[in-house]
Amino acid sequence: MYGSKVVELSDDEILSRISCIDIFAYYIGKDFRLGRAICSPLRKDKSPSFTIFKHNSGKYFFKDFSTGDSGDCFTFLTKMYALKRFDTYRLVDNDFQLGISTRSFSTPTKQYVGEHLKEYKHVEPSSTTIQIKSRPWNNKEDKQFWSKYGICCNILNRFHVRPAEHVWVNDRLVVSANRYNPIYTYDFGQGKMKIYQPHSKYKWLSNTSASDLQGLSQLPDRGDTLVITKSLKDVMCLSIWDIPAVAPSSESCVIPADIVKNLYDRFARIYILYDFDRTGVSFANKHRKLYGFTPLFFTNGKFNTFDYKAKDLSDFISNKGLRAAAELIEYTCQEEYLYQGTYPQVRMGEDGRADTL
């Protein structure tokens, strides 16, 4: 069009809108320090030897003293994501939503933040705040992920599960979503939440404690049977058949005695459904000894047990479909009195999975 200016992706165009420091800080995450040595985000590094510094020219560069690598923020991204330099422009343009290029760009599968996320797997709520920027539900990727477990949008909304675009911990941006790394938040209220990244090496961020039970606010006032399971995903799966369930913030948490007393005041029987592995069996038996819970497992063929070919209920639904899960639950209810009465008909597609989000 006459009079329009063609804007091309380049160092100068991007750095006229955001600073090099912004780029370093965004992709390095909470470990970012200007002028101080940190562990390299480009490799496994136990001895801090990586630094961001201001050159005499006024520009900012990185230097890894162990490997000798150095360069500007775009060179840094070529090494972090194994990209060509021009593709790092597209990456930054996409992630910072600068709007320079109209061409779509799929963010590489490598996380923005690396090994340091281990520090955030579980932190005490008194010292940590988690903030998020929400995003709308995506009918393609979100539906594809949750519907394979039979979980629809109504269930997600009931249990306060939301998709997120960005996550901050103590006011520092630590992770952002992309098509390869969706992020979901489990909101407990009062500032407590869990961050779930199903495709990431570091799936969980949390500021919850042992006293925070997932699904607690959705329980009925009274009931015959309650299931303690290991994840909110399994709690939501059990809700398909109106089976009351809760999950601790971690399978290795011991539920406090005062909470268990409250649950026994409301439910006649309590079962615990954990993974059939060392951690799951150990903590299921610990709860059995402490509180009298009855352990149930999806066994895997070890020790002459039946092989369900699934580690938990959500995995079973994903592998076998809702019909097979309904039949298993009906059989278990008859044998173990897990559930009294008839279970509702579930709307399913021809493949036995939930129809829609």
Image (cartoon, helix red, strand yellow):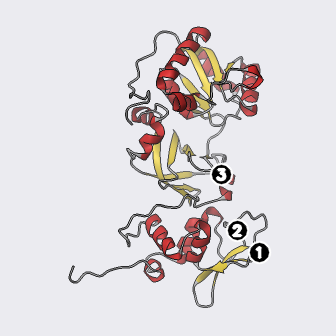
Q: Residues within 10 Å of mark 1 (few under 14, many from 20)?
A: few
Q: Answer with mark 3 or mark 1, whichever residue precedes in sequence.
A: 1
Q: Residue furthest right?
A: 47
Query: Distance of mark 3 from mark 1, alpha carbons?
Result: 27 Å
Q: What residue is shown with label 3? A: 120
Image quadrant where residue 38 sits: bottom right
Assess whether mark 1 and mark 3 are in contact (beta carbons under 8 angstroms): no
Q: Is residue 328 above or below residue 217?
A: above
Give the camera-side residue of 203 and 124: 203
Q: Residue at x 61, y 29 (%)?
A: 312
Give the mark toward the camera: 2 or 3: 2
Assess whether mark 1 and mark 2 are in contact (beta carbons under 8 angstroms): yes
Q: Residue at x 56, y 12 (%)?
A: 331
Image quadrant where residue 171 sits: bottom right
Q: Residue at x 58, y 19 (%)?
A: 226
Image quadrant where residue 61 sits: bottom right
As helix, strand or loop, the secondary structure at mark 2 comes to: loop
Q: Residue furthest bottom?
A: 57
Q: Can see residue 215?
A: no
Give the mark toward the camera: 3 or 1: 1
Amino acid marked by disc 2:
Ser
Q: What residue is shown with label 1? A: 66
Q: Can see residue 65?
A: yes
Q: What residue is shown with label 2? A: 40
Measuring from the top left, give residue 82's x and y in whole percent: 59, 68
Q: Is residue 183 above or below residue 279?
A: below
